[in-house]
Image (cartoon, grey):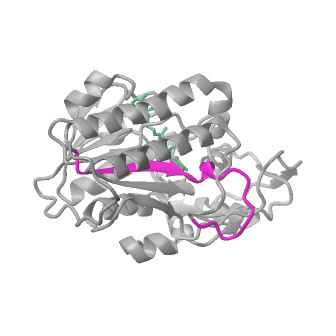
């Protein structure tokens, strides 16, 4: 592969009809929604997933080549990358709390796994790599709204490993003839997001409502978050592969924030279940307000988050209740 300095401006990858892409982590929450969109757009899709937190049935009835395997297996990653033009790298050990309990595994998957994917991409002349990053890389938030150049001082092993992954990805973009895009997701919610021990607030609320339990809010509930629907996140990935752009990082959110109190009302309306809300002591280190500045991705890629949270929650609760009844 040719060495390239500096980062160059590249056209989109053009006709997607015959384009084969690899989605790592494609059986997971965000990955499966992305796979669905890519198939609708006529891409040919391969998925690599070790099913540690993903589900084969997220891909049910979808016409994909599924490879059950691990991003830590460099030989496998290199082999399955030989015929792909672009890679969406989503496979990761996900979440701050999980990383506190398993810091070694977090780094092995998120840092070494990402280097494996990059090396496979380099050796096989992959043209574009889209890396799923996270707002967790910012750590303590000191301004509102949060632009891409907000200081990055992660306060969990997960935030550190996602930031290290980003840096590796950007470095490969500088060194080699490959366009690399890092998409930093804020609070993603939507179809295929299951309730688990490390779950986000919306699946936790859904689980509690389904079991007629009160919603627990930490602090006074006036803290705010930027909740972005997974379908909009999938579109951001699609734009990142099809649009002409240069390597770089982009926030992916809605540019709007709602309070947790407001969220409790929305989830009750969406579910039709009205349990009590109980308030508990604020959690240590929890940020008060969070809202993404999405002007860069709007300007460069034409991203326009489309899904109203109340409608998105209605769709989510329909799905969640069907899964769990
Ligand atoms: N959910 C969010 O709110 C959010 C926010 C910011 C960033 N992200 C990022 O988005 C990506 C997808 O996250 P998600 O929320 O869909 O989580 P998820 O756990 O549903 O998806 C991760 C997928 O990767 C697979 N995987 C894990 N380790 C693997 C390995 N070693 N080899 C192969 N596959 C492996 C899992 O089985 C799963 O299918 C991650 O990179 C995550 O860091 C998610």
**In the picture shown, does residue 255 fall above or below 202?**
below
| Residue 201: x %, y % from top left | 66, 50
Picture quarter with the N terminus: top left
- Let me know if residue 30 appears in the view: yes
For the point 23% across and 58% down, which residue is it?
40
For the point 53% across and 55% down, which residue is it?
188
| Residue 312: x %, y % from top left | 50, 64
For the point 32% across and 55% down, which residue is it?
5
Which is more toward the observer, 290 or 208? 290
The magenta span reads 126-147
Is residue 187 found inside the magenta-colored segment of the image? no
Which is more toward the observer, 235 or 274? 235
**In the picture shown, does residue 267 fall above or below 212?**
below
Total residue callouts: 0
- Let me know if residue 325 appears in the view: no
Does 134 sit left or right of 204 as displayed?
left
**In the picture shown, does residue 290 fall above or below 103?**
below
Does 28 sit left or right of 271 as displayed?
left
């Amino acid at each position: 592969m040719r060495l390239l300095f500096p980062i160059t401006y590249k056209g989109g990858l053009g006709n997607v009809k015959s384009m084969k892409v690899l989605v790592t982590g494609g059986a997971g929450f965000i990955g499966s929604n992305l796979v669905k969109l890519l198939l609708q757009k006529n891409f040919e899709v391969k998925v690599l997933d070790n099913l540690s937190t993903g589900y084969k049935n997220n891909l049910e009835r979808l016409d994909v080549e599924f490879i059950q395997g691990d991003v830590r297996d460099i030989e496998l990653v290199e082999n399955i990358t030989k015929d792909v033009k672009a890679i969406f790298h989503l496979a990761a050990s996900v979440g701050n709390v999980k990383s506190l309990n398993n810091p070694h595994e977090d780094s092995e998957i998120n840092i070494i796994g990402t280097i494996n994917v990059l090396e496979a991409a380099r050796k096989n002349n992959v043209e574009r790599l889209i890396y799923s990053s996270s707002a967790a890389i910012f750590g303590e938030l000191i301004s509102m709204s949060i632009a891409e150049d907000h200081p990055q001082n992660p306060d969990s092993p997960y935030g550190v490993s996602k930031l290290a992954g980003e840096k590796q990805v950007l470095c490969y973009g500088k060194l080699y003839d490959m366009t690399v895009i890092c998409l930093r997701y804020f609070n993603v919610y939507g179809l295929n997001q299951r309730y688990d021990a490390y779950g986000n607030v919306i699946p936790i609320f859904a689980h509690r409502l389904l079991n007629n339990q009160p919603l627990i809010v930490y602090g006074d509930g006036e803290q705010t978050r930027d909740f972005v629907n997974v379908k909009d996140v999938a579109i951001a990935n699609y734009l990142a592969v099809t649009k002409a752009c240069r390597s770089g990082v982009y926030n992916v959110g809605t540019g709007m924030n709602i309070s947790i109190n407001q969220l409790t009302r929305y989830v009750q309306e969406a579910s039709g279940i009205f349990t009590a809300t109980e308030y508990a002591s604020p959690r240590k280190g929890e940020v008060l307000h969070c809202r993404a500045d999405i002007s860069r991705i709007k300007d460069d890629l034409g991203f326009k988050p489309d899904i109203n949270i109340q409608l998105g929650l209605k769709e989510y609760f329909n799905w969640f209740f069907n899964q769990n009844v």
